[in-house]
Image (cartoon, rainbow, N blue to C red):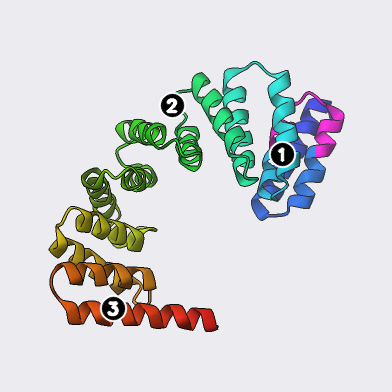
Amino acid sequence: MSDSDQIASLIESARDAHARGDFVRALALCTEAITISPTNFKARFMRALVNQAAQNHTDAIADFTDILAASDRAPVTSAALYSRAVSHHAMGRIENAAADCGAALEIDADHFDARYLHCITLKAMGEIEQAIAEATRLIDARPDYNEAIYTRATLRHMNADWSGSVDDFTMYLQHTGTSGEFQHTAYFFRGVNYHYLNANDKALADLNRALMLQPDNATTLARRALVYSALGQAEESAADIQRSKDLLNAKKAS
């Protein structure tokens, strides 16, 4: 068997082991392939991805960095930059992740995963306006990108754009129906936005929906107490305040 055939077989076997979750075996196979051909990008990229899946992010970053140092092929470079950004982000290296995402997008502006991670890292860095701009670019390109819609909704809330946040949470809830991963949070924050807009009947309806999903959420109960107070329903407000306190005290005691 030629070296190229042997390497191809090792990479395929590594891919199968990776899919099974056998990361130790996958890493051994990739390393064997790299030993035969140290410049083989496929083997090194596969090893980096396996290390990433195994939470060996330092080793993954090292392999992605080697790939970037040796390759000037745009598809390889943009994929390696994004993948390295994922590991940087997992390690809490937010600025490094943002820089790699930005570099990947300079090569491939349509790399949606890189743009979404860029949005997330900008949010973590407090660059709210830039993060909103990135989320908007994603939504303009892919109107069904629900994670980006949800993220922009939270960013607009953070930016005190209550109406814009309401619009985005409404879009997210319309798209996801009852299956949305962040359904409770979407109803909660849309209710908070309505409260800030003095649309307290709508706020109450949303907070009621949120509490149907998480009846023992102390934060939601405390917020509904404020809305009840704004609506002049003092008895209901007091009941929610007491229930919220009871839940928090029980949590402290446990």
The quadrant the C terminus occupies is bottom right
Q: Can see residue 179? A: no
Residue 46 magenta-highlighted = yes
Quadrant hosting residue 104: top right
Asked if the residue at tag 3 contacts the one at tag 1, i.e. Cβ–Cβ closer than 8 Å, the answer is no
Q: Which mark is residue 18?
A: none
Q: Disc 3 on helix, strand or loop?
A: helix
Query: Which residues are the magenta region?
Result: 31-47
Out of 34 and 206, give the one closest to the viewer.
206
Q: Quadrant of the N terminus?
A: top right
- Look at the magenta stretch and give its main secondary structure: helix
Amino acid identity at mark 1 = Ala
Gap in angstroms between the C-alphas marked 1 and 2? 24 Å
Residue 17 lies, in percent from the top left, at: 71, 50
Q: Nearer the viewer, mark 2 or mark 3?
A: 3
Does 102 appear in magenta? Answer: no
Residue 129's x, y, as percent?
37, 33
- Residue 16 in view in this figure: yes
